Each structure stands twice: as structure tokens, then as C-alpha cells.
Amino acid sequence: ISDNWPGYSLDLFTYPQHYYGDLEYVLIPHGIIVDRTERLAKDIMQDIGDNDIVVLCVLKGGYKFCADLVEHIKNLSRNSERFISMKVDFVRLKSYHNDQSMQDMQIMGGDDLSKLTGKDIVGTGRTMKVLLNNIEKYKPKMIKVASLLVKRTSRPDGYRPDYYGFEIPDLFVVGYALDYNEHFRDLNHICVINDHGKAKYRV
Ligand code: IMP
Ligand code: MG
């Protein structure tokens, strides 16, 4: 998605009334997110062959993407008669304060860290690097990272996921489980928040 992509008008879609006035525009409508995720599932299926997988969902922002990705992998595997055994685990990472990435990172949970991770967004890439360092200790046969979004940040530290849905401009986005101080996770579309929204939910 290019830097000058104007997005879709909010009036074209429905979204929760409690966010009226807090958003600028729709960057990616929910339907397109789901369709793109189906294709990622197909690509992943092709690459993993007959290996079993452990899906490691990065909470909280990755829960929608992870759930939809797992659903698509299940459906594709059922329809192709190629049954892939899947385990699911969760870790929680926290690093953002308002819309700023913080230095210190907390990792909570995840007893079975291996093979595949499902993530919401790679911004600076810092979060993903910390997580991967922790997973590599368990020496999995293969680690693949799937992220719905990759941001074109001005300070990328060289990290690229194996699979990603969309490369987006360096904007702070919310919706589809992505939050701004825990708000907007209950919005289906990925949207750009406006100044009013930022001020209203600032902590
Ligand atoms: P990074 O360490 O900058 O790559 O940030 C990664 C994490 O920060 C993501 O997993 C998100 O939880 C959060 N994050 C980064 N950019 C955004 C955004 O635009 N909206 C909401 N959360 C974001
Ligand atoms: Mg967050």
C-alpha cells in the first residue's frame, strides 16, 4: 500500500458507533484482510510440506490474524486431504505506550515456543527480534514468521517476516485486534486514527 494511498471513506462501511469521530479513514477493509490471509495460508501450506506445526500467536494484537490464518489452514488442509497436525500456543508481548515503541519488552506465557509464529504487525521489527531470540533457544526444526502488516518505518532494523499480508506506510493503525492503549481492538477494519481519537484515548 503506497504512501499516497488515500484509503476508503468511513462512510462506505459500518463500524462501532463509539468510534465515530475518532478515525481518519479505512486503510484496509476487513474483507480484504480475510481474503489476503487465505492466500497466506495457502503459501504456508505449500512450504511446510508434511511437517506438523505449532502456531505461536502473539497476543493481543495478533489474535484476529492468527485465528483467521489457522481457520484458513484448517479449511485448505481439509479440502486437500493433506492433514497437518496443529498445536496452538500464545505469548504476550508489550512494548507500546500511546503510539510510541518503548525500549523495554515483556514476554509472558508460551510453554511450547517453536516452528511458526502468527503476528499482527512488524513496525520497527524490535519486538519480533526479541521474540525470535527467545524461540531459537528451543532449537525448533523450522521457524517461520507470518505477520499481517509490515510498516515502512524510517528506522527499520532489517527484520522481514517470511510471510506478510500488506506493506503499509509508516502510520499508526488500529482495528482487527490492533490497539491504541487497548482501544479499537473491537473494530473490524484496519483504520488510521485521527488527532481527536489520539487525544481521547491518550494515557
Ligand atoms: P515493533 O517493535 O515496532 O516492530 O512493534 C511491534 C508491536 O507494536 C506490534 O506487535 C504491535 O503490537 C505494536 N504496534 C506497532 N505499530 C503499531 C500500530 O500502528 N498500531 C498498533 N500497534 C502497533
Ligand atoms: Mg498494542
Image (cartoon, grey):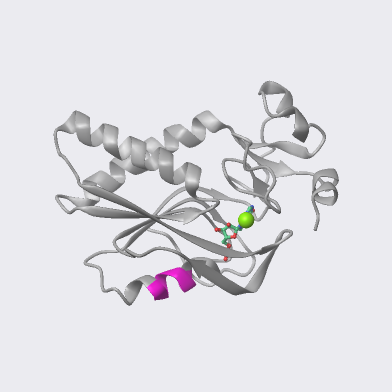
Q: Residue 57 placed where, x, y %?
A: 42, 53
Ligand 2 image position (quadrant): bottom right
Foreground residue among 103 and 86: 86
Foreground residue among 113 and 98: 113
Q: Quadrant of the C terminus?
A: bottom right
Foreground residue among 183 and 9: 183
**Quadrant of the rendered structure where residue 35 is?**
top left
Q: Is residue 167 magenta?
A: no
Q: Quadrant of the N terminus?
A: top right
Which residue is at a point 32% across and 63% down the rendered structure image?
112
Image side of residue 135 versus residue 63, left or right: left
Image side of residue 146 versus residue 93, left or right: left
Q: Residue 82 placed where, x, y %?
A: 15, 38
Q: How many marks?
A: 0
Q: Is residue 132 magenta?
A: yes
Q: Is residue 74 above or below residue 103?
A: above
Which residue is at a point 44% across and 64% down the rendered structure image?
109
Q: Main secondary structure of the magenta part?
A: helix
Q: Residue 183 placed where, x, y %?
A: 70, 46
Image side of residue 125 versus residue 4, left or right: left
Which residue is at a point 66% across and 40% down the rendered structure image?
191
Give the magenta part as a residue range.
129-134
Which residue is at a point 43% across and 37% down the rendered structure image?
36
**Quadrant of the rendered structure where residue 124 is?**
bottom right
Q: Is residue 7 above or below residue 172?
A: above
**Quadrant of the rendered structure where residue 90 is?**
bottom left
Q: Is residue 196 above or below residue 203?
A: above
Q: Residue 114 placed where, x, y %?
A: 30, 64
Image side of residue 107 versus residue 84, left or right: right
